[in-house]
Image (tube, grey):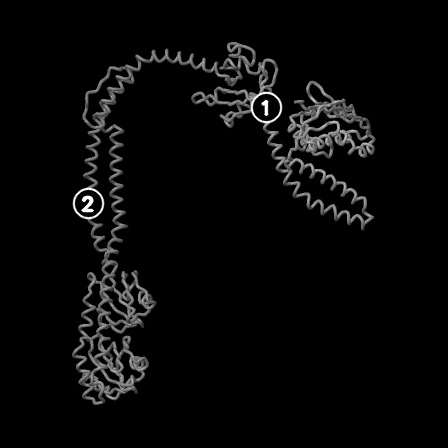
Amino acid sequence: MKLFKSRIFWKIYIINLAIICMLLGLMFIVSRIILPEISKEQYRQITDKTVLRMKDQISFIVKDLQSLEDYVQSNEHFQSNDFEQLFKGLENIVTISPYIDSATVLDTNGYVQGFYPNDLKHLQNYNLSKREYFQQPLKTKKVYLSDVVSADTGRYLLVVSIPVLNNDKEVERVVNLSLRIENNQIFQSIFQSFKIGENGYTFIVDRNGKIISHPEKERIGEDVSQNLVVKKLSKKQSGYEEITNTKGITMLASFEHIPILDWGIVAQIPVDEIYQPYLAFQKSLWTISLITFIVLSILTALYARQMIHPIRRLYLAVDQVAKGDYNQRIEKIDNTEIGKLSSRFNEMIHYIRQSKANLQLKEEQLKEQKEFLRKIIDMNPSYIYAIDKEGKFTLVNESFAKLLGTETQYLLGKKIDDFQFNVKSNLIHVWEEIEKIKERPVLEEFKDKEGKIRWVETVRLPIFAPNAGTEQVLFVSTDITERKQAEELLRKSEKLAVVGELAAGVAHEIRNPLTSIKGFIHLLKEGNEKHKHYFDIIESELERISLIVNEFLMLGKPQVMNFQQKDVSVLLKDVMALFDAQAILNNVHIVSEFESDLPLLYCDENQLKQVFINVIKNAIEAMPNGGEMKIQAKVQENNLVIRFIDQGCGIPKDRIAKLGEPFYSTKEKGTGLGLMVSYKIIEAHRGSIKIESEVGRGTIVDIIFPIS
């Protein structure tokens, strides 16, 4: 395991170099992305502060200029029409205010009455009535601060126009105080003192986009209203924007709108100047990165070489252990992870020797555990068995063997097809579905040694061989025959409950519209003899619906039981009297055979009559060709038995078990509800109903009441 042939060495070296390159590259990327933004943000703060300071300065100047209003209106010089007095007053103002360079006094017609200094002599009696700075104070009687205006002398001015009012508050004259933008040293020095870097500068524009202040004096008065930033200022906006100036230089500009004058201040600096520190840093970064890369590469190679030596010692020791030499030991290398690994290697060798000694003991314990598990499986009452792909039993417990009436030893190795315990056994289907079914229980029918059918729930569990898919299938079956019987009883009970709730709702909803339909059908029938046959059919079907609704109501409406001692023979005679006419129409002869001295029955008279009516009605309908029907009442083995015997068509044996279930009837148009109600009534009287029938010969219905 030579150093330069070691894969670990080269892996460590290459990984470290990759990390170094990645970090250097990340540093370049970060400097490329973040540093320009930092520089940009720093200069933005400078330009923002500049425009805000200039805004404060302008506000201060405006307040100073506006303060001249009181001085002018209260000065007695401006109350006189004498030129000397006016001249003296204007001279005082120019002397007092550092911002006022010249002034004129206009009468109400706009003619110049006075001026200062003497270079305005040519304006004497000159008419300035069309000037905005004259019209506004004359109209508003308030101080007016003009935009940048070009005087007749070619100078650019800012004019403060102050109206002089008489005692009647009427304008007597207008005093115009002018600030000569280019010549006013104080005004220019204030705003040109704000320097931004080497090439940055600020300028001010009025509401019309004309330059008021600029480092280049020749640009004062220039119209820059089409400039992107000036356009935003004209919309009373403030902010920060990257623009291109008139010389084609890309600038970053902060701009601020001044509401009091509707002016705008712009402070801007070239983008190239902002990025100069970043470019200088990036140039030096290449040199630093190259030196760092070379130094770190050398250190990485030395570090990797230092790590390889102890690993080589470990490699040689492990190689000997792999050949079966468990007496290898490694002297402690150092306190690093490699040293700890050597210590753990020595411990591992010790554990291997111990494990080898304990292996035989574990095998003996495994045998005991296997026998113990076998006993548990055999004691389990569930049917447990396993089969392989050939369908042979590989595991059988005692419960399953007893089901088939044999021994477990006899079943092992035998094919499952030799035993017909599963009524619907399909081994191929089991193997196809095992991946889908997994642990989901499957309901099956088993046949025990006596041939009886038993219901079981079977869980099929695949047993996987290493790298070979499903090798065997384990079946765990639980006998649920008794539970199935209980579920069947519960299902019938739930069905009865649902039918009761449904009946009450449906019957009430149908009965009212049914009555209306029957009434209107009867009216239509009287006025239309042509289709009388159809109306007869409709009325017969409506009567059938009404009958079903009545049965629904009887089923759904809880009946209040009124139990009294009654003579059953009297109840039967009352019911028979009801069917005399129907029996004659159907050619049925009803015969009664009642024993004398029948005991009184504790019952609800109306409920029992309903049962008798249902049974007799069914018997008559079962004899469409006529015949004889017997009604017997007698005492038999401490029970009062009422028997109804007819000579009707009879009921098939496979249908008798389902009689009494809702909506099950042997009649073509029957609902099954009448007999179901009868069962419920008899159960409430602690009695039972027994039905025997033979197709073609008739039916016997026994209603049995215990004599308490």
Q: Position of residue 475 (x, y in %)?
A: 51, 20
In the image, taking residue 569 as reference, residue 171 lies left or right, namely left
Q: In this rendered view, identify the residue nearer to me: 462 or 503.
A: 503
Q: Name the residue beneath numbered marker 1.
A: 485
Label of residue 288 in the image: 2
Label of residue 66 in the image: none
**Which quarter of the figure is the N terminus placed in?**
top left
- Rate crowding at label 1 as few (under 14), some (14 to 19) or many (20 or more) other CA atoms within 10 Å: few
Q: Is residue 691 visible?
A: no
At mark 2, the secondary structure is: helix
Nearest to N terminus: mark 1 or mark 2: 2
Relative height, residue 376 to residue 541 (above, below): above
* Of labels 1 and 2, the one closer to you: 1
At mark 1, the secondary structure is: helix
Name which residue lies at 67% across and 36% down. Answer: 554
- Rate crowding at label 2 as few (under 14), some (14 to 19) or many (20 or more) other CA atoms within 10 Å: few
Name which residue lies at 22% across and 81% down. Answer: 72
Three-letter amino acid code at the position of disc 2:
Ile
